[in-house]
Image (spheres, rainbow, N blue to C red):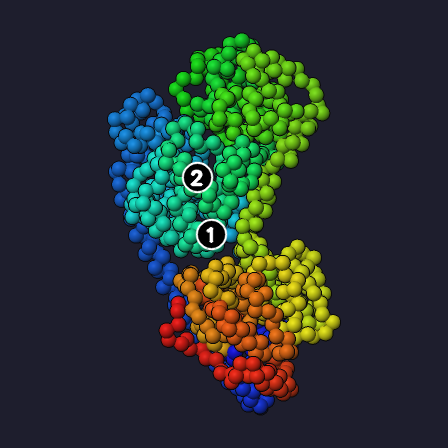
């Protein structure tokens, strides 16, 4: 039985009919109808006075909050202006170091040895980019997100402004599907004393620099203990300011292993390692990072790899991983690969390549081709990261454009007659699934490539060449190609390998990281309350893997039709319509019978859920001693009730966010969990058994179930970091007026006491000494 509830906040008028019959909300003593009317009139008057007082207080709090934010903004702006000369010098060197020989000489004189090593290492990996000065924000502009999507915390290996490839493509897909993305880079330094720096780089995507204690070459060494501590503190401040509650951690480089695993342990966040390269043979990679990668792959909840070679490597070591190849933004290339003047000044044919001019490119091969065919024009688009280009920079038919915006890649591609993949063959390149290959395919262009092991599956779409002369012959064949069917097949291959497909595959794998949760709702009339409850679940549940089961107890107000309409819109919704009112316990048992999840949640239809409600409760269930958990609420008759300050749904969500963040990870033992919302593991439910259907329409079955939990040795706890609004008194109003309520109460209390002895009324006061 759910205990006595105070009058609920009037967010919506309380319907005249009950909701889920069997919802045992109501007073512990039933006064006469006349006394009840007087009480209700007095309560209504008090509520109006309370609302007026709360509006006054709310206005004052808003004003105070605004003044605090203004003061903080002024303080942080002042700190920004006091940026140290040291960091200004480093920023200047970043900008100049690759601009001229004089600047490089100056950099060699002025930059610390560790910084020079870093610049050299990054140049080999296409990591060196201009580092923007990120001004700290007093109130971070964290943007809008879909309330039903978890946040993504990405520990990146390249800046967002770097050459646009898999890291940015995948994070853009997450953002396009409603997730906020916090793209954390190691190359920047926040302003002095700033807890972090954040700037928006795309819709729902924010590049972040955490406040570390000292510089580290993050391609050579693991994160130091000092930096790990500082990184955790900086991230905690970011999470608090940006209200990051439920998140997936995505790691691109093993330097971040310690911080990622700390978040996995302390916040129960899942960790995905997206392995994009054969790091063990990568140029200048540090031995510490190779060892850290081994720790990461064995600890991560999900390991994704870009190539079958990488999958075989890890599978041979007993690591289960998912192959998620690279891809192309097909619509982007299709729309922009059109006639333009970028290469109009060059005589045909044009042999093209774009990407980093890095150590893995066979420049001798390119020199051979350009020398043998002086009438061909070779266009190489991309940053230069090596000193020796084998003389290509002195050849009149070789055109080095430098780095160009990603938006221009389809335009250059349109001008290429043949595309090249001229890599050296080694362990690193054999493990590469080139992004550019899929982009070349989107235009149907012929591609001549060295025989990379990872590209063997595409032998029907590409010309493979082994020797220099063979490469030259294959280009000539490609130039003479007139196979229009092959062109369309290439385009179709690209369409089938869009980044959206990679996101879907990844999302399905992520979903599997979370044990399925079955949410059971029992309804009886009150269609609008039920609709509001369901819509709140759909809109505010970020947990990636759940189903919603609604059991209706023969409603007569159109609830059944409404539920079928909802079922047609959401694949995760199941609906069962009873021909008669079977009561609260029996209907919940029916729903649990249909449930597929390893977690069971019973939720009243007169509730409105808030952000992170489900994740928070399930986190507490990680303690095997806890058998059942419930949230705090505005309206219930025991210790789960807290004081609230909101007067509408919008304020309610703001209140819930602030309260639950302030009480993150906290719970207390409670003698009885009212079943307006409870969660338990499926195996615990199987052990305890069904709700006792002898309680009929309802009342006392939740007291009974809590007692059964305790008898089996389990704790029942109230999670202070999960809040749910509860209307209360929604199902028994008519029964109170007719006197049926008292009869049900008396009968069920007698049945309860026959099992457990005298029933003791519940109280709002927490008992001293209860564990927190």
Query: For residue 294, which numbered disc appears in the image?
Result: 2
Q: Sequence order check: which comes first, mark 1 or mark 2?
A: 1
Left/right placement of residue 476 relative to residue 270 reads right
In the depicted structure, whether residue 348 falls above or below residue 696: above
**Badge 2 density bin: few <14, some 14–19, many ≥20, Cα 10 Å:** some
Instruction: Identify the secondary structure beneath mark 2.
Output: helix
The x, y position of residue 457, in whole percent, is 62, 28
Q: Quadrant of the C terminus?
A: bottom left
Q: Residue at x 55, y 20 (%)?
A: 450
Q: Are marks 1 and 2 in contact (CB under 8 Å)?
A: no
CA gap, disc 1 to disc 2? 20 Å
Query: For residue 249, which numbered disc appears in the image?
Result: none
Q: Quadrant of the N terminus?
A: bottom right
Residue 231 in view: yes
Instruction: Identify the secondary structure beneath mark 1.
Output: loop
In the depicted structure, whether residue 368 falls above or below residue 506: above
Q: Residue at x 41, y 67 (%)?
A: 59
Q: Quadrant of residue 487?
A: top right
- State the residue position of label 1: 269
Q: Nearer the viewer, residue 729 or 102?
A: 729
Q: Nearer the viewer, residue 144 or 724?
A: 724
Q: Residue at x 55, y 71 (%)?
A: 675
The x, y position of residue 540, in whole percent, is 54, 59
């Amino acid at each position: 039985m759910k205990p006595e509830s105070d009058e609920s906040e009037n967010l919506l008028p309380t319907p005249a009919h009950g909701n889920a019959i069997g919802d045992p909300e109501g007073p512990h003593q039933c006064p006469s109808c006349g006394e009840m009317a007087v009480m209700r009139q007095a309560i209504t008057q008090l509520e109006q006075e309370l609302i007026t007082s709360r509006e006054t207080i709310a206005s004052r709090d808003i004003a105070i909050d605004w003044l605090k934010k203004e003061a903080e903004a002024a303080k942080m702006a002042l700190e920004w202006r006091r940026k140290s000369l040291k960091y200004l010098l480093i920023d200047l060197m970043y900008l100049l170091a690759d601009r001229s020989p004089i600047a490089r000489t100056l950099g060699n004189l002025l930059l610390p040895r560790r910084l020079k090593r870093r610049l050299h290492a990054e140049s080999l990996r296409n990591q060196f980019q201009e580092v923007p000065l990120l001004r700290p924000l007093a109130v971070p502009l964290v943007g809008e997100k879909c309330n039903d999507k978890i946040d993504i915390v990405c520990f990146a290996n390249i800046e967002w402004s770097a050459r646009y490839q898999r890291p940015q493509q995948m994070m853009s897909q997450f953002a396009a599907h409603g997730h906020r993305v916090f793209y954390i880079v190691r190359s920047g330094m926040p302003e002095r004393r700033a807890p972090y720096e954040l700037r928006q780089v795309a819709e729902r995507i924010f590049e972040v620099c955490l406040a570390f204690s000292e510089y580290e070459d993050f391609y050579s060494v693991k994160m130091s203990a000092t930096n790990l501590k500082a990184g955790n503190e900086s991230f905690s401040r970011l999470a608090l300011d940006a209200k990051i509650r439920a998140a997936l951690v995505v790691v691109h480089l093993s330097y971040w292993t310690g911080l990622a695993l700390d978040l996995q342990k302390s916040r129960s966040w899942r960790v995905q390692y997206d392995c994009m390269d054969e790091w063990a043979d990568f140029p200048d990679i540090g031995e510490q990072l190779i060892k850290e990668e081994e720790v990461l792959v064995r600890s991560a909840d999900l390991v994704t790899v870009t190539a079958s070679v990488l999958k075989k490597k890890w599978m041979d070591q007993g690591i289960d991983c998912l192959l998620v190849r690279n891809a192309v933004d097909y619509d982007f290339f299709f729309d922009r690969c059109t006639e333009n003047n970028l290469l109009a000044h060059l005589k045909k044919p044009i042999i093209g390549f774009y990407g980093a001019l890095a150590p893995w490119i066979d420049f001798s091969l390119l020199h051979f081709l350009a020398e043998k065919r002086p009438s061909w024009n070779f266009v190489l688009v991309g940053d230069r990261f090596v000193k020796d280009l084998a003389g290509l920079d002195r050849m009149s038919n070789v055109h080095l454009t430098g780095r160009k915006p990603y938006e221009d890649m389809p335009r250059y591609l349109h001008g290429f007659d043949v595309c090249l993949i001229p890599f050296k063959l080694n362990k690193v390149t054999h493990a590469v699934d080139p992004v550019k290959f899929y982009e070349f395919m989107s235009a149907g262009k012929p591609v001549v490539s060295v025989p990379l092991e990872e590209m063997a599956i595409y032998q029907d779409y590409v010309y493979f060449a082994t020797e220099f002369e063979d490469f030259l012959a294959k280009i000539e064949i490609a130039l003479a190609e007139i196979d229009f069917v092959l062109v369309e097949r290439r385009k179709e291959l690209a369409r089938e390998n869009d980044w959206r497909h990679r996101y879907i595959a990844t999302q399905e794998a992520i979903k599997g990281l979370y044990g399925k949760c079955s949410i059971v709702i029992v309804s009886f009339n009150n269609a609008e309350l039920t609709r509001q409850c369901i819509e709140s679940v759909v809109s505010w549940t970020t947990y990636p893997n759940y189903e919603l089961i609604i059991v209706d107890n023969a409603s007569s107000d159109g609830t059944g039709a409404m539920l079928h309409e909802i079922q047609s819109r959401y694949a995760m919704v199941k609906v069962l319509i009873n021909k008669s009112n079977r009561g609260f316990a029996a209907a919940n048992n029916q729903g649990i019978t249909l449930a597929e999840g390893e977690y069971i949640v019973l939720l009243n239809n007169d509730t409105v859920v808030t952000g992170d409600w489900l994740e928070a409760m399930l986190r507490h269930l990680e303690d095997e001693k806890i058998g059942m958990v419930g949230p705090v609420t505005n309206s219930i008759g025991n210790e789960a009730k807290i004081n609230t300050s909101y007067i509408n749904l919008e304020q309610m969500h703001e209140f819930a966010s602030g309260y639950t963040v302030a009480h993150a990870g906290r719970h207390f033992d409670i003698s009885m969990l009212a079943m307006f919302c409870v969660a338990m593991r499926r195996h615990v439910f199987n052990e305890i058994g069904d709700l006792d259907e002898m309680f009929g329409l309802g009342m006392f079955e939740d007291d009974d179930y809590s007692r059964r939990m305790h008898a089996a040795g389990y704790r029942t706890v109230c999670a202070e970091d999960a809040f749910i609004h509860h209307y209360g008194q929604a199902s028994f109003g008519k029964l109170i007026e007719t006197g049926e309520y008292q009869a049900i109460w008396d009968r069920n209390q007698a049945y309860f006491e026959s099992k457990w002895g005298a029933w003791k009324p519940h109280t709002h006061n927490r008992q001293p000494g209860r564990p927190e």
